[in-house]
Amino acid sequence: MKRITLGALALLLSLQVAAAAPFTIAKPWTTVRARPSADAPAIALAFGNDALPVVKRSGEWVAVRLSKGRLGWVPAADGVQAPAVAAPAPPQLPGFSALDAPPLTAATPLLLTRGDPMAPGGT
């Protein structure tokens, strides 16, 4: 039971990380550090408009995932993290639903247009 609970918790946490908006570097470049400290060793450089996956925030620092899976820290002041926005719902036509459309069958005629490679003599 404990394994299932811990596994479910790990899955939920990974989904939350995946859903977080990336941290985009706003300066021409910034140093990625091993720990959230200006005195920590530099482990990489991130350049302007790089979008890095966010792992967590700690005060004035943001933990980001680098390309090879390594964890690094960048100053929060060196970039922006847009709030996650849900995708807009598709527009709905009044009085019509995709569920109202008849199902396609083998007898359903297909509309082929000129220039369609599927049309007889098409390109």
Image (cartoon, rainbow, N blue to C red):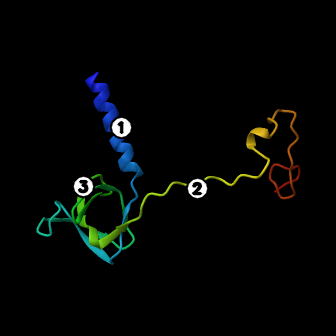
Q: Marks 2/1: CA distance?
A: 26 Å
The residue positioned farthest toward the bottom in the image shown: 28
Q: Residue at x 76, y 52 (%)?
A: 93
Q: Quadrant of the C terminus?
A: bottom right
For the residues marked 1 and 3, what is the alpha-carbon distance in whole angstroms? Answer: 19 Å
Q: Which label is found at residue 121? A: none
The mark nearer the N terminus, 1 or 3, is 1
31 left or right of 123 in image: left
* In this rendering, position of residue 66 left or right of residue 90: left
Q: Residues within 10 Å of mark 1 (few under 14, many from 20)?
A: few
Q: Which residue is mark 2?
A: 88
**Tags 1 and 3 touching, CB below 8 Å:** no
Q: Earlier in the sequence, mark 2 or mark 3?
A: 3
Query: Between marks 2 and 3, how big is the CA–CA gap?
Result: 32 Å
Numbered label attached to residue 11? 1
Q: Quadrant of the N terminus?
A: top left
